[in-house]
Amino acid sequence: MAPQGQPLRARIYAQALVISCGCLATCASQAMERPPLSAACRDWDSHIAELISQHRLIHELDDDQIHEITRLFYQAASACSALRFEEGLAIYEAIPIGPVASRLLR
C-alpha cells in the first residue's frame, strides 16, 4: 500500500506547487502594473509645475531658460490633453529642470 500512496502524494504535491506558482505569478504581475498613462501625465504636470514655480521664486534660472522650460511644459500638457500620452510623457521627461539648489523656506 505504501508504494501506491507515495506516487499519489507526489502528484498532489506537484499539482499544489504548480497552482502556487500560478497564483504567485498572477499576484506579482498585478502588483507590478503601472498606473494609466493619463495618471502619469497628471503627476508629471504637477511635478514640473511645482519645479517651475520654485525656480521662479528663487531666481535660479534666467528668463530665457524659464521661457524654454515653460514652452516645453505646455507642449507636453497639450500632447497629454490630446490623448498622446507617450509623446507628452517623453516631453515631460526631457524638460531640463531639476530641484532648486537653494533651500526654499515654507
Image: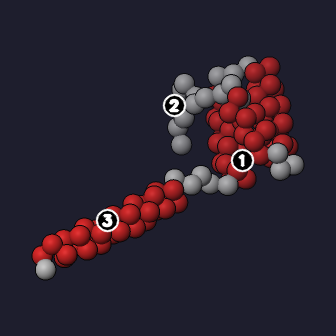
Viewer-side label of 3, 2 = 3
Residue under the image location 19 percent in, 75 percent down: 4
Rate crowding at label 2 as few (under 14), some (14 to 19) or many (20 or more) other CA atoms within 10 Å: few
Residue 52, quarter of the rendered image: top right
Quickly name the residue at label 3: 14
| Sequence-wise first label, 3 or 2 | 3
Tag 1 near tag 2, CB within 8 Å:
no
Return the mark for residue 103. 2
Residue under the image location 40 percent in, 67 percent down: 19
The one of 105 and 60 positioned closer to us in this rendering: 60
Quickly name the residue at label 1: 41
| Sequence-wise first label, 1 or 2 | 1
Residue 20 x, y percent position in the rendering: 37, 65
Residue 93 x, y percent position in the rendering: 68, 33
Residue 79, quarter of the rendered image: top right
On screen, residue 27 versus residue 59, left or right, reads: left
Q: Secondary structure at mark 1?
A: helix
Name the kind of residue labelled 3 in the image. Ala
